[in-house]
Amino acid sequence: MLICGWNKTTLLDYPEHVAATLFTGGCNFRCPFCHNRDLVTGQAAGNEIKEEQVWRFLEKRKGILQGVCITGGEPTLQPDLPEFIAGIKKLGYKVKLDTNGYRPEVLKGLLEKGLPDYVAMDIKASEKNYARVAGLDREGCHFDIVPIKESVEILKRGTIPYEFRTTVVKGLHTTEEFEDIGKWLQGARAYYLQAYRENENVLCPGFDTFAPEEMEEMRRIVSGYVRYAALRGVE
């Protein structure tokens, strides 16, 4: 596993669990608003955390931490992800997986083996706006919406808890497209709209945040289609 960062204790990343978060390196998207530039571009190379350190830490924190969140970058790019998750679960932890959903075959395999206990999948935008928001609408890039749609259906048909989520960015999204997103995710268990916040590690700085009332309007639109819709990071 290419682990390029970790948060040893978090109350936010894994709903209702005290957890540690591990950040994997590398990503197949180039979302301009990404907060983990170094992980995506490879600039975190040379700062990898050895697996032995992770295993020692998790062994020591048994009974204190309840879960481990694996995020990125994009974790499904890691060839040894199934074995890594299995090792974490053997220590008694629950595992939350964050993914962009672009490798549905990996997601399906993990679920068939009963490895993740919770999956959070990013929904970058409406279907027609997806390539742009994922940063794959430029020359030399190929984007296919079909794998994303497959992952959505895998989660909706499955039995483990999951959520869909969108980081809402002024300059990339419109209020109107959340009608299309709602229709696409019809019947989904949970959908969160996260307010964009700029920081020093954003891949392409310069975007803005929607006002709280605008975020609420987007939430209202999608709430007509999914079972639960809520806002995150709105002040």
Image (cartoon, rainbow, N blue to C red):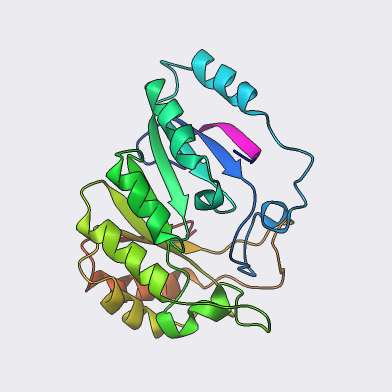
- Residue at 62 percent across and 22 percent down: it is 52
Q: How many numbered discs sit on the rendered protein?
A: 0
Q: Residue at x 44, y 85 (%)?
A: 128
Residue at image point 75% right, 47% down: 44
Against 173, residue 17 (above or below) is above
For this view, does 103 lie left or right of residue 185? right
Q: Say above or below: 207 vs 65.
A: below
| Residue at 53% in and 37% down | 21
Locate residue 51: give its quadrant.
Answer: top right
- Span of residues in magenta: 3-10
Q: Position of residue 202 (x, y in %)?
A: 69, 61
Residue 175, located in which quarter of the rendered image? bottom left
Residue 234 or residue 138, whichever sits in front: 138
Q: Observer-nearest residue: 124 or 217? A: 124
| Residue 32, x across and y down, in percent | 65, 70
172 inside magenta stretch: no
Horizontal side of 110 relative to 11 (left or right) equals: left
